[in-house]
Image (cartoon, rainbow, N blue to C red):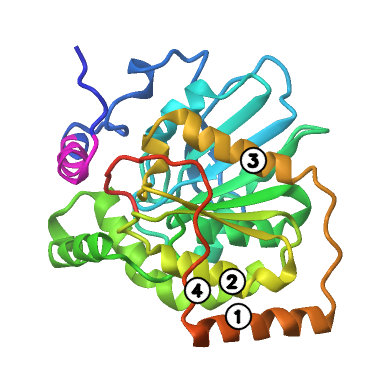
Amino acid sequence: MLKRRPKGVLEIGWATFEAAWTGRLEHLPHWAEYPDALVERIGFRAGGGLDWRLSALRTPRPRTAPWKIVVVTGAPSWAEYWTGALATIGQDREMWVVDRPGFGGSEPAEAVVDLSVQAQALSPLLDSAPGQRVLLVGHSYGAAIATLMAAAQPDKVAALVLLSGLFGDIGPTGARLVELGRRIHGVIPRDLRNAITEVLAQRPQQPIVREALRHLSMPIQIVHGDQDDFTPIATAQALAEDLAAIGNVSFIPLPSANHFLNEGPPDVVLALLEAAIASAYREPEPAPSLSARLGAISKQVRAGLAGLARRPALQPETLGSNSAEV
């Protein structure tokens, strides 16, 4: 009998070594949990003229679903940790979760540290059937890549979700794991090695990501758990406040939730995705006037000087599971 999917830092670390020794691409094969009628693995050619074969898990559908949900995963990038959501999502949704370049079943063997190159490679995921709309989701390290994908092809993305996004700042648990990985970089398996290499090279690229966000017009939801010790919620909130003037950004703090909402009950993360889809149907608000923008900035300054507390979180409570993906 196959064991349950490994969770937690120690279990996933051991499973990564075990998978490397045996040549297995997934820590627990997706077919051991769900039949191919629910979740199937598929390969596709990278975009941007890159000669890489990429791998993803998707939900097969007999007919075109009105919405295609594309998930760009974190670091390390393992699509199989989204199988619960993939298997649970309704028939009126199609879902793809990718092993990013350098991870799992995707080429190349080495790390691809340039966020723009990752975005180019993953661009075919935004292709959709006639009449189908795309919800793009970036988790953790994948949030920056999803942002650049949306910026390169804004006409193909109806809404964007940045889930537990890594925006340069690493929390205490994440920092300890990155430092440990840096010290033993030469002896750890490919996926862990590439994850450390990516994260160490991400921070200098953040200005490009933040500038791209300022020019996006589709609804953007920044979702973050207040117990996230891999990527600080304060950084996500500050980013949302910096983007508040453009009018299409929502910040959703999740009480008692950690970094790995995808490993919690599938209904929780699926409800968040449905909320993002609903936001794409709302009428866009008119762009704020210069005086309104200045007023918003003035209000933020006054609030900061007065030491006002953050807005209280009004979102549903949920708990994620500890894992080792940043």
Residue 131 seen in the current view: yes
Q: Closer to the N terminus: mark 3 or mark 4?
A: 4
The type of residue carrying mark 3 is Ala
> In the rendered view, does 146 fall on the left or right side of 112?
right
**Mark 4–mark 2 contact, CB under 8 Å?**
no
Magenta stretch mostly in which secondary structure? Answer: helix
Q: Closer to the N terminus: mark 1 or mark 2?
A: 2
Element marked by disc 3:
helix
**What residue sits right under mark 1 in the picture?**
300
Residues at marks 4 and 1, CA–CA distance in whole angstroms: 23 Å
Span shown in magenta: 7-18
Residues at marks 3 and 1, CA–CA distance in whole angstroms: 27 Å
Element marked by disc 2:
helix
**Mark 1–mark 2 contact, CB under 8 Å?**
yes
**What residue sits right under mark 2 in the picture?**
241
Q: Closer to the N terminus: mark 4 or mark 1?
A: 4
Q: Closer to the N terminus: mark 3 or mark 1?
A: 3
Residue 49 seen in the current view: no
Residues at marks 1 and 2, CA–CA distance in whole angstroms: 8 Å
Q: Which residue lies at the image location 51% right of the left edge and 57% below the top edge?
A: 143
**What residue sits right under mark 4 in the picture?**
206
Residue 319 got which mark?
none
Q: Position of residue 323 (x, y in %)?
A: 27, 44
Quadrant for the N terminus in the image: top left
Element marked by disc 4:
helix
**Mark 3–mark 4 contact, CB under 8 Å?**
no
Quadrant for the C terminus in the image: bottom left
Q: Nearer the viewer, mark 3 or mark 4?
A: 3
**What residue sits right under mark 3 in the picture?**
275
